Amino acid sequence: MSTFAIVFYTLMIAASCLAAYYHRREAFMVLFSLTLISFLMGLLGGEVWLRYIAVAIGLLYACGGLAYSFREFLVQTLPRDIAKVMRNAPLTASFGLFVIVVYIVAAIFAPVIAPFGEAEVVGSSYAPPDDTMILGGDQLGRDMFSRIIYGARNTVGIALLTTALAFLVGSLVGLMAATLGGWVDQVCGRVVDTLMAIPSLVFALLLLTIVGTNVVNLILVIALLYSPVVFRLARAVAGNIVVMDYIEAARLRGEKTWYLIISEILPNATAPLVAEFGLRFCFVFLAISALSFLGLGIQPPTADWGSMVRENATLISFGEITPLIPAAAIALLTVAVNFVVDWMLHLSSGLKE
Amino acid sequence: MNTITRHSTTRRRFLQTGAAGAAALTLPMRFAHGAKKGGVMRMGKAHGQTVDSLDPGTHENGFTVAFTFGYNGYLTEIAQDGSLAGQLAERWEASADAATWIFQLRKGATFHDGRDITAEDVVASFNHHRREDSTSAAKPIVAPITDIKADGKHTVIFTLEAGNADFPFVPTDYHLPIMPSKDGKPDWQSGIGAGAYRIRNFDPGVRADLDRYADHWDSGRGHFDAIQMITIVDPAARTNAVITGEVDAIDRVDLKTVHLLKRRKGLTVHSVAGNQHYTFPMRTNIAPFDDNNVRMALKYAINREELVEKILQGFGVAGNDHPIGPGQRFFAKDLEQRTYDPDKAKHYLKQAGLDSLSVDLSVADAAFAGAVDAGVLFGESAKAAGIELNIVREPNDGYWSNVWNKKPFCACYWGGRVVEDQMFSTAYASGAAWNDTAWEHEKFNKLLVEARTELDEAKRREMYTEMQQILRDEGGALIPMFASYVFAASDKLAVPAQMSSDAALDGERWMERWSFA
Amino acid sequence: MGVLQLVAKRLGLGAVTLLVVSIIIFGAVELLPGDLAQQILGQAATPETVKAMREELGLDRPAPVRYVEWLGGALQGDFGTSLANKRSVAEQLGPRFTNTLFLAALAAAFSVPISIVLGVLAALYRESVFDRIANVATLTSISSPEFFLGYILILFLSVQNPIFPSISSVSADMPFDERVYVTLLPAITLTLVVIAHMMRMTRAAIIALLASPYIEMARLKGEPRWKVIAVHALPNALAPIINVVALNLAYLITGVVLVEIVFVYPGVGQLLVDSVTKRDFPVVQACCLVFAATYILLNLTADVGAILSNPRLRHPK
Amino acid sequence: MSDQNDARKSLLLKIRGLRIEGRADEKWFEIVHGVDLDLHRGEVMGLIGESGAGKSTIGLAAMGFTRDGCRISAGSIEFDGMELTSSPEEDLRMLRGARIAYVAQSAAASFNPAHKLIDQHTAAPVQHRIKTRKESEADAMELYRRLRLPNPDEIGFRYPHQVSGGQLQRAMTAMAMSCRPDLIIFDEPTTALDVTTQIEVLAAIRDIVDQFDTAALYITHDLAVVAQMADRIKVLLKGDEVEEADTRSMLANPKEDYTKSLWAVRSFQRQQKPPAEAGETPVISVNGVSASYGPVKVLENVSFDIHRGRTVAVVGESGSGKSTAARCITGLLPPTQGDIRHNGQVLPASFRNRSKDQLRQAQMIYQMADTALNPKKRIGEIIGRPVAFYRGLRGADLKKRVDELLDQIELEPSQYYHRVPSELSGGQKQRVGIARALAAEPEFIICDEVTSALDQLVAEGILKLLDRLQEDLNLAYMFITHDLATVRSIADEVVVMKEGQVVEAGPKDEMFKPPHHEYTDLLLSSVPEMDPDWLDGLLEQRGVDNIGEAARK
C-alpha cells in the first residue's frame, strides 16, 4: 500500500463524505461509486489502475472546469438575451461549444497555426516527435501536427458543406412537398423511399467510382445520399405545421406557396431542423471517414483525419498512439456537436422536467 | 553459373540436359531432407477477391498464384536459386535452332483423381490459352508456339515461330498448369490438378482449404497435412492475425509498421530481393518524351534513394532504368548506377533546348502501393532541376485499361520475369502489346532476336548487358526502384534460407516447400 | 384500414421500388468506367483478350437487352451466374447473406434489449447522474468511426489479452457456439455503433409521453413509478421505438462493410464491394436487391408493428 | 355552534395557508398565495375562478400532488388527520386512488389509449389490494349501470377511442369510484362536452356522489354548473380566495365586486337590429350547399343569407357541420352541390380560383388564438402582412396603418408592435386575430367559436369589441358557436344546425320564444341556469333516462 494509494483513497472518501454532508446527492453517488470502483481496481489491477482512475478523474474535472469557465466567459461577453440562455446551459453543452470553437479556429487559421505545409516533406518518415515536429512525422516524413491542423480544415469544412447542401435540398423539397401536398407529395415520397432502399455506402461507392473521387463530387454525392433523410424529417415537421390555422389564414389570403414555405413554415421548422443538422453533420463526418477508409474519400496528399486513421491503422496493433490522434479528433468533435445538439433539442422542446 | 550452363540445352548435351532434368528434380528432394511432416499451415494473404476463379487464364493475384502452385502441377518450375527445374517434365531437348522443343513427361505422375498425366493433357492445357477465342492473360506468352502435339503418351513437341533458348522457362508461368483433359478440352472447373495438395474447399475472396495429396509423385513436396489460406486484405487485420497467431504467416507486411513487427517475439520478418520493379514509362512517340534528352533529364531528376527509403521503407534497391534485377542471370553489374543529379538534369534540358519543363505524371495506387506518394516525392526532387511535375491522380478503377499504356507519362508496376528475354520481349520489343513506352530501337530489337537463339553463354551475357545499357541511356522507362518481397512468418515454421526471388513467399511455392520446424 | 390491406399495398409498392432500384443499379454499373473484361484481365489486358472476354461474357450486346434478359431470369428467381467466376449468384450470395444475417442477429440480440432497457431507465431517472452518464457514454461510442472502434477492441480483447480472435473467419460447418465466439467482436463493435441511437430514441419517446394527462392520471391513481413508465408510457411509445429499431436493424444488415473488412468477416458487404470494383453486374444487382428488400421488409414490419401496438388502428370504431 | 363542532368532527380535508410556487425560466414564483379550505365528509365544494386562478393546482394539492415544475412552498394540507405536505411519496401513493380520487377535464386524454377501460378501472383497487380483479370488474359493471352507460356489461371491454366523450367522462367517474374514496376531485369534468351531453354527466356525477356520500371538490369556471353541483362555493382569483359561502347565499347576494362581476357577465345584451329589408342582396348567401369529406356527407342542402351589418349566429353541437359550412364559404372545402354568392355573384368553389379581392372580402377569426397566430412572427408583421399584401403599403404608411389597427383593438401600439404571440394573454391574442382580419378591410368576417376558449370576462370584452367594430365598419358577421348565451347576447339572426342540416333559422327574438323546433328546444333547455334547482327540475320534467344523448333520438 503505497502513500499514493493512501492519499488517493483518503481524498476520495473525504470528498464523498463532504458531498453526503452537503446533501449533494448526485455528486455523492458519483464520488462514492468511483471510490468503490477504485477499491475493486486497486485489488485487481494494482496501483497502476488507481493512477489511471486518478488521471481520468483529473481529466474529467479539467473538462468540467474548462466548460464552466467558458460558459461564464460567454455569459460575460455575449449580449444579454443570449447570455440569459447560456447561463442555464448544461456544462456538457458549453464544453461542446468550446470544442467546436477551437476546431473552427483551427480550421480557419490552419496555415497560420500549422508550422509546416500540408504536403511538405519535413523529415524522415516516422521521425519521432521532437521540437520541430511536435507529433513526429508520418510515413512520408510530413509533419503530423500540421497535417492534423489542415485535416480540421479539410474534413470539417467538407463535412459542413456537404451537410449544408443536403439540408438545403432535403428541407426545401420536404417543405415543398408538405405545403403542396397531393401528387407532388406522393412522388417525392416514392422517390425518397427508393433512394433510401439502396444501401447508402454502396451507392456512394458506385456514384463516386462513376464520377471520380474529387472533393466536389464527394460533397455532391454524399449530399445526395443524405438529403432523403432530411427530406423525411422536414416533411414530417412541416406536416404538423401546415395544418395550423395561421397557415390556413395565409392560404386564404392568397399567399404564394413560396411565401408560405419561407416565411410562415420555415421559421417554425428551424428548431428541429437545426438539431437534426447537428446529428447529420456527425453522420456525414463519419461517412466521409468511412469512404476514406475504402479509399474513396478525400484523396491524398490532402490531409484528412479519416484517411490518416486508415493509413496508420496498423500502428494500433502495436499500441502506438499516432492513429489515435486523428480518430480522437473525429470522436471529440462529434461528441461536442452532439452535446450542443442535445441542449438545443432540450431548448426547442419546451419540455420542463 | 553452372546451373545456367545446365540449361543451355543442345543435342550434344542432351544427356546432360536429361541429367539436368534429373538434377533439377533432386533440388526439392535435397531441400526436403529432415523437413518435418504434418501440421496445418494457416496463411494470411493480402489478395483474393470474390471474383477469383479456377480458370488459370484469369489467375493474377497473390492468392490465386499460390493456390494454383499448390494444387496444380507444371511442366517446369523455378528452383529457389533461380535455376530451372523439371516437374511434370522429366527432360527436354531443343532442335539446333532452339525452335522445336521436345518434353518428356514424368511417368507415374497422377492427377488428384488418380488419372495418369498424359501428353494429351499437356496439349489441351496449353491450347486453353492458345485458342483463337482465348481470354487467357497468358495468350501473349504462348503466342510464339505455332504448334504443339503429343507424340505418344509421354512426349510433347512444341514448335515455335522462332528459336528461343529459354523456352523451357515458359511453362513455369503460373498461368500454365497441366490440367486433366476431356476430349481435347481441359477441365479446370473441377479443380483437379496434379499438385502436392488437393482442394477441399475454395471460397473466392474468403479462403481456400487444401489437403496433402498423398499419392503425389514427389514425396519431397508438401509437408503440411493441410493448408488454410485466408484472404485478409486489410493490412491492419493481417498484422493482427499474425501477431495473435491466428495465421502462421502473412505476405505484404505493412512497411509502415515493419520496424514494430520485427520486435515481436516468435515472429520473423523475411525480405527477399525480387525482380518486381516500379516504373514511370514515358511514351517515346509523344512530345516531349520523343526527345531522349528530356527522358535523360527526368531520369536524373528523380531521387531513387529517397524513394527506396520512403516508399519501400528501405526494402528494395535503387533501379538503374532497366528492368533486370540484381538477382538475375544476366544482370549487368558493371553498369554505373544512376543517381539524383539536378545539374545533369538541367544540362540535358539545355541539350533539349529547354530551360524549364512542365509535364503531367499520371499516378494511382493501383499502379503500385505508394505510387501517389512516389509521385509527390518525384515532384519535390524534380523542382530542383527546374522541372515542373504536376501529379495527376487517376482513379484506381480501370487504371490499367485507361491510363497505363495510353497516358504519355504514368506510373506502372512490373512483376519481373526470371528470363531476361521474356522481360525485354514483353515490354520493350518493338510492337509488343505491352511496350508501354512505345519504344522503337533497331539495335535493341536486333540484339533481342539474336540473343534469344544464341546458345553460347558468354555471347548472350554480352548481348544482354548491351541491351541493358541501351535501355538505361535511351529507353523510355524511368525505373527508380526494385522492391523486395516482405513477409512475416511465425518461428514455428521452418522457412528455407534461400527462397525464390521471382515472387513473394518463396515464389508463392511455400505450400510445397515449407514445413513446420 | 386493415393490416392485411396495408401489407398487400406496401408489398406491391415494395416490388415497384425493387424494380426501380434494379434499373438504377444497372444504370450505375453500366456507367462505371471500364468493364468486367478489363477489370479481370487487369494489367494483362490486350485488345484481343479483352474483346474475346467481352464476347464470352456477352458484354458486347446492347445494355437494354442484357438488362431485360437479366430481369427475365430474376423474375423466375434465377439471378444468373457471376460473370467473373461462372458460379451461380445465388450459390455465392447464399452463405454470405446467412453470415451477414447471423452477425446482424447477434448484434441485435445485444443492442436492442440493452438500448431499450437503458432508454427506459434513462427516462425513469431522467436528468439524473445515470441518465447523463449513459447519454455521454453512448454518444462517445456512436461518435467514433466504427473501423476505429473495431481496431481498439481488437487491440484490447485480442492482441493485448487474447480473449477473442482478431479475425472472425466463419465457415458453414462451424458449430453454433464456436460461430458465436468468433463473431463476438464484430458484434460488439456494431452494438456500440447502434446502441446510442436506439437508446436515445426510446428515452425521448417515453419522455415525450410523460406530459400527457393519462400518465398524470396513472400517477394520481397511486400507481408506482416503474409501473407508470412500463405499463402506461411504454405501450404508447412502442411505435417510434419499433421504428428506430427497424432502422438500425436495416443498418446492421446493409451498412457493415467496414466492420467486415476490419474483422475479415465474409459477409455480403465484402462481396458487394468486390463485385462493384470488378463490375460484376449480376452479383452487384443481386446484393443491392437483397439489401433493398431487407430494408423494405423491415420498414413494413415496423409499420405493422406500430399498427398492432396502437389499439386505435388495431380496433377501428 | 353545535353544528360547527359536529362539522369539525367530520372534517375531512383541512388546508391552511397553502402556498404553491411554479417554475418558469429558472425562477420560482408564487401561483397560490395562502389559501384556506375546509371540506367535511359528504360535502361538495365548488372551486370557481378564471384560468390562472389556481383552482386545479389547489385541487391536485389536495391529493398531495404537484405537477412537474410546481412545489408546495408553505402551508399544511391535512387529509383525515394526515399531513400530506410532509408525508413521504410512498404514503401519498397509498392514498391516491384509494382514498382520494381524481376526475380529469378531458376523459378522452386521461384514459390511456393503449388499455381497455376495465383494465384501467381495476388498476387502482388491485394496486391498493382493496378488491381482487374479479370483484373490481363486477363492481365496475355495477357502477356503469348506475351511471346509466349503455350496455354496461360490455362497454368496459372497449378501448377509450371506441367510446363517446360523455360516456368516457362517466366511465372516469366510475373509475374514481372504484375504491369508494372519501374524496373526489372533479377538475372541470364537463367543460369539454356539448350542453346536451353535459347534463347527463352532471346528473350522473351528482347521483353517484349522493349515493356514496362522497366528499368532492368540484372545480369549474361555469357558475351555472357549479350551482347545480356544490353545497358550498369558494371563489378564487389569481391564487387568492375572494369569498366563500353556501351556494344559495352566494348566488343570491355575492359580497365581493369580483364575484358580482362574474355574475354580471351574462347581462351583456346588444339589442337586436331589424332584419334587412327584402330585396337587399346579402353580402354572403349560402344556397343549397352540400359537401362531404370523401364519402362522408357532412353538409346537406344548407342555405342561409348574411346581410351587411348583421350578425348571423350558426348554432349546433360538435359535428353539426357549422364549421364545415364556414369552410365551404371560405372555399377550403368546395361544395359538391349548390354555390356561395358574394354580393349576388357566384364565388369560385375553391379559394385557389378566387381573385385577391374576393379573398380579401371574406376573413376569418379562429377559436384557438394560439394556433391562429404564427408563434415566430411579431404582432407588427402578423397584422402588417395583409395590409402590405392587399394594399401594397410599405414602410411608414404600413406602420401607421398597423398602429391604427392596434388602436382599434385597444392594444397600445408602441407596447405590442414588437411582441411575439407567446408574450400575449389569450384575450390579447384573440384581439390580434381580429386585427389581422380587419387589416384586409373585409365586408364579412367568420368568427369560429371566438370566445369559447376564453374566460367569461375576457370573452365579454371580445364580444363588445366585435360589436363596436360592426357598428363602425358596418361588417357582416357569421358567428359560429355552441354557446347559446353568446348567441343571446349578440346575434341578429340564428341558424340552428344538426347533423349537417339546418333545423331552424330566423331572427333571434323569434328563435328564443317558443314554440321551438324540438331540437332547438332541447338545446335551449339544456343550458344550465343559475338556479340551484334547475337540474332537479329538468330531470323531473324529462325523466332521468330521457336526457342528453337519449333525448336526441
Image (cartoon, rainbow, N blue to C red):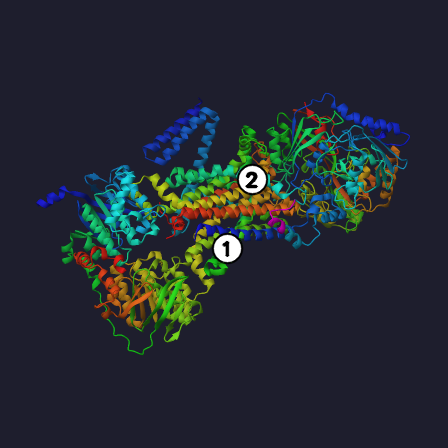
Residue type for callout 1: Gly
Q: Nearer the viewer, residue B346 or D479?
A: D479
Q: In x, y percent, where is residue A237? A: 44, 54
**Residue named by callout 2:** C100
User: Which element carries disc 2, helix, strand or loop?
Assistant: helix
Residue placed furthest toward the bottom? D279
- What kind of residue is marked 2? Thr
The N terminus of chain D: image quadrant: top left
Q: Residue at x 19, y 44 (%)?
A: D13
- Where residue B167 sits, quadrant-wise, is top right
**Chain under callout 1:** A
Q: Is residue D283 left or right of residue D537?
A: right
Report the disc number at residue A189: 1
**Percent position of residue B381, x then y:** 70, 43
Is residue A295 part of the magenta span, yes or no? no
The quarter holding residue C165 reads top right
- The span picked out in magenta is C71-81
Q: Which residue is at 45% across, 53% downward? A: A236
Judge from the rendering whether residue D529 lies leftward or rightward of residue D404; answer left or right: left
- Residue D298 vs residue B342, the one in the foreground: D298
